[in-house]
Amino acid sequence: MMRESQIMNIHYFTGLAAIVLVGIHIAFRLIMPYGQSLEYENVIANYQNLPYIILLELILVTVSIHGFNGLRIILIEWRQGNHWEKGVTWVCVASAIGLIAYGSRTIIIASMAGTI
């Protein structure tokens, strides 16, 4: 099991990384007018762009880890106990893995939409 200080360092790192990654994502969106960037053809074209796919996957992983770790911290502060802490930790880890798997599936399906 990791020490709480290591978990908090991961939390801080993912928070800062999320800010940077979302900033890059917004910069990608500013390349063309907003309304035009939401047209179906342009959205699918984004998913054909490998650097953009990697950016979306990094945002998904970073925000999921940061969010579920934050929820874990709140729930552990809400109620203490070894049993409770282990249960909350496992539920948050499993939920984060589930969300990342589902989000990755969505990114993969969208990236194949223009090739079928």
Image: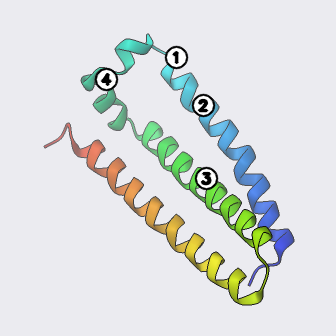
The amino acid at mark 3 is Thr
Q: Are marks 1 and 4 in contact (CB under 8 Å)?
A: no
- Name the residue furthest bottom: 83
The disc, 1 or 4, on the residue closer to the chain's N-terminal end is: 1
Q: Are marks 3 and 2 in contact (CB under 8 Å)?
A: no
The location of residue 31, given as percent across then percent down, is 49, 16
The amino acid at mark 1 is Leu
User: SS of the residue at dot 2?
Assistant: helix
- Name the residue furthest top: 33
How far apart are labels 3 and 4 at the CA level?
25 Å
When the figure is inspected, residue 32 is found, relative to residue 50, above or below; the finding is above
What residue does disc 2 label?
24
User: SS of the residue at dot 1?
Assistant: loop
The amino acid at mark 4 is Asn
When the figure is inspected, residue 34 is found, relative to residue 57, above or below; the finding is above
The disc, 3 or 1, on the residue closer to the chain's N-terminal end is: 1
Q: Quadrant of residue 8?
A: bottom right
The location of residue 54, given as percent across then percent down, is 48, 45
How far apart are labels 1 and 4 at the CA level?
13 Å
User: SS of the residue at dot 4?
Assistant: helix
What residue does disc 1 label?
30
The N terminus: image quadrant = bottom right
What residue does disc 4 label?
42
What residue does disc 3 label?
62
How far apart are labels 3 and 1 at the CA level?
22 Å
